[in-house]
Amino acid sequence: MLTTREEYNHKKEQLCLQMKQAGTSPVALKKDTSNLFRYRTQKADVRLDVRSFNHVITVDAEKNVAEVEGMTPYEELVKETLKHNRMPAVVPELKSITIGGATTGVGIESSSFKHGLVHETILEMEILLSDSRIVTASPTNEHKDLFFGFANSYGTLGYALKLKVKLIPVKPYVELHHKQYDNAQSYFKDINNICKTQTIDFVDGTIFSENEMYITVGTFNEQAPYVSDYKGRYIYYKSIAKKEIDYVTTSDYIWRWDTDWFWCSKHFLVQNPLVRFFWPQQKLRSTTYWKIRKWAHDSTLAKALLVFQKKQESIVQDVEVPIDHAPEFIEFFHKEIGIKPVWVCPTQICNKDVHYTLFPMKTDTLYINFGFWDVIKSDKPDGYYNKKIEQKVRELNGTKSLYSTSYYSSDVFWMLYNKEEYEKLKNRYDPMHRLNDLYAKCVLKK
Ligand SMILES: Cc1cc2nc3c(=O)[nH]c(=O)nc-3n(C[C@H](O)[C@H](O)[C@H](O)COP(=O)(O)OP(=O)(O)OC[C@H]3O[C@@H](n4cnc5c(N)ncnc54)[C@H](O)[C@@H]3O)c2cc1C
């Protein structure tokens, strides 16, 4: 749904007023959805209601730019841009991830080998600061420090209310090639080579086991001899091992992982053919699973039922490792953690002249994002396995996303995420500390 600049400006004024009226109290956002996998233990005094900032303002197909409100889910943004045969250059997989959330968090998808992480697709932002001012941050203006410091700041420097995002032209279909590998060395070597090919549009991979790995390459196509549909009876991730070539519509490609939350829908039994038959098709989506999960987290009944369950540790993480170390990481992962499948997504910095302050990446390196989301049985203290992963990623000069649980000590955390620059940004943009601190928020869950 579209809105106008006038409406946006009106809502913006109201929000500034809300921020001003809250005085110096700590603030947080009031939103209906979230894709964070950590629950905060403390509530902020004031929750800014930003739920109405969820519209696209303009889509300029000629300039390949969309102007969009900060809390707009990608589902909405994609719907509007596809009407113009365009899509945002990088679209995170889950429909309810918002453009502001993916920019201040770290968004990635299979076009990231070509366009970088989500924050590299952002051209300009209007950001609400904790002193109620709104500033425009761009890569070249007086707030460029905020522009480059925004990625991985998780709402601790300000709130993006409006963003300009880069679009790319699309064709109606995506042709997919799934290629199987049985050893990690040649698997990552081929990913490296494939990422140098400019004629393809998407690359990601799925590791089912030590000797069953797939690279999936996607290319836009005007035509398709047939079209597969993974929004209902058939499950996308299961098709990877069955088909060498496949065709889907561009919209279905973009949302291929949302229907079954990658493969995590198994926890809700919807991969059972009988359950799936009766499950309403429109409810096969990540937002449904979030709602059930939230209910289980909040409900006393669910907690009581889980009392007799064996102790387990939740391992829901995305980590980026330089490609040269990717075989070593996956070997460690199979041996020490053992979650399967693992999602693989190559990414790199595309504009080699820029540096994102709080999410350090080398400009001459291709990184592999490993995504793994499951629980494992454990008789160890909580965090035992997550800490092992953190340690290994550090050893291999990688970086961990902060949307889920983290166990770093303050010293290690700040060594990894650039304390000196963060403090400069904090002093300039949130000197009263109304917006929480990155370590307190992401590790201490405050
Ligand atoms: C199981 C799982 C799988 C995932 N897989 C992927 C993936 O494949 N690809 C990918 O890109 N990402 C993935 N993510 C991560 C996701 O992109 C991040 O968690 C992202 O930050 C979520 O955005 P959201 O819009 O849901 O924001 P929320 O969850 O609502 O908020 C995230 C943080 O950002 C802050 N925030 C939200 N909006 C704004 C804003 N407009 N301005 C400033 N701060 C704001 C909030 O205060 C909060 O701290 C995954 C997460 C999970 C749990």
Image (cartoon, rainbow, N blue to C red):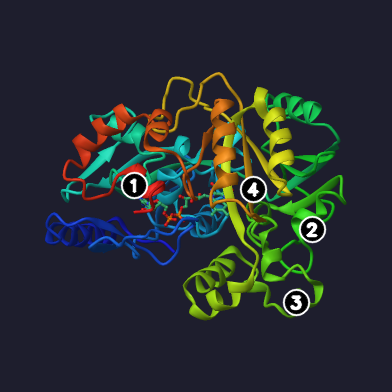
Cα distance between the residues tagged 1 and 3: 41 Å
* Residue hosting label 2: 228
Element type where label 3 sits in the image:
helix
Instruction: Report the mark closest to the observer, 3 or 4.
Output: 4
Residue that badge 3 annotates = 275
Q: Earlier in the sequence, mark 2 or mark 4?
A: 2
**Amino acid at circle 1:** Ala
- Amino acid type shown at disc 2: Ser
Q: Which mark is residue 440?
A: 1
Q: Nearer the viewer, mark 2 or mark 4?
A: 4
Q: Mark 4 highlights which residue?
A: 372
Q: Quadrant of the N terminus?
A: bottom left
**Tag 3 and tag 2, C-beta contact below 8 Å:** no
Q: Nearer the viewer, residue 421 or 356?
A: 421
The answer to whether the residues at label 1 and label 3 have Cβ atoms under 8 Å apart is: no
- Asked if disc 4 and disc 1 are in contact, CB closer than 8 Å, the reply is no
Per the model, the C-alpha gap separating discs 1 and 2 is: 45 Å
The amino acid on which the numbered mark 3 sits, given as a three-letter code, is Val
Comes first in the chain, label 4 or label 1? 4
> At 59% from the left edge and 43% from the top edge, which residue is drawn?
109
Real-space Cα distance between discs 4 and 1?
24 Å
- C-alpha span from label 3 to label 4: 25 Å
